[in-house]
Amino acid sequence: MRGLLKQTRELIAEGKKAEAQKLLPQVYKAIDKAARTGVIKKNTAARGKSRITALLNKVEKKEVKKVKSKK
């Protein structure tokens, strides 16, 4: 789980949003499995999924702003 989260954050930092988007379902699955087996609590899992999604959306919004400002 932690490895997938780290890999996703690195992809987002590098600007590879498409690759990060493809990895997102695997991240969700790993987080949900950790919560289901008791490794992390349910709310911790929800927070983790929310934060990684928000980070990805933040990158997408920045790219849209960059495209608009270049015109």
Image (tube, rainbow, N blue to C red):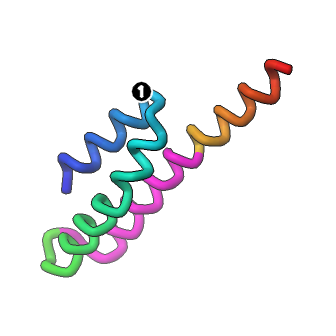
Q: Quadrant of residue 41?
A: bottom left
Residue 38 rendering spot, x and y as whole percentages: 15, 77
- Residue positioned most to the right: 71
Q: Residue furthest bottom?
A: 36
Residue 22 position in % (x across, y down): 39, 52
Mark 1 residue crowding within 10 angstroms, few (<14) / some (14–19) / many (20+) = few
Q: Main secondary structure of the magenta part?
A: helix
Above or below for 12 versus 56: above
Up the image or down, 62 lies above or below 23; here it is: above
Residue drawn 66% across the image and 41% down it: 61
Q: Which residue is mark 1?
A: 14
User: At 14% from the left edge and 70% from the top edge, which residue is drawn?
Assistant: 39
Question: Which amino acid is tagged 1?
Answer: Glu
Q: Residue 11 lies in what quarter of the image?
A: top left
Position of 47 relative to 23 (above/below): below
Left or right: 34 as drawn, with respect to 60 = left
Q: Which residues are magenta?
A: 40-57
Q: Is residue 47 magenta?
A: yes
The quarter of the rendered structure image containing the N terminus is bottom left
User: Which quadrant would residue 40 be assigned to in this image?
Assistant: bottom left
Residue 34 located left or right of residue 53 = left
Residue at the spot 42% in from the left edge and 30% down from the top edge: 13
**Residue 17, image x, y percentages:** 48, 40
55 within the magenta span: yes
Label count reads 1
In this image, 33 relative to 26: left or right?
left
The x, y position of residue 63, in whole percent, is 65, 32
Q: Residue at x 46, y 61 (%)?
A: 50
- Viewport quadrant of the C terminus: top right
Secondary structure type for disc 1: helix
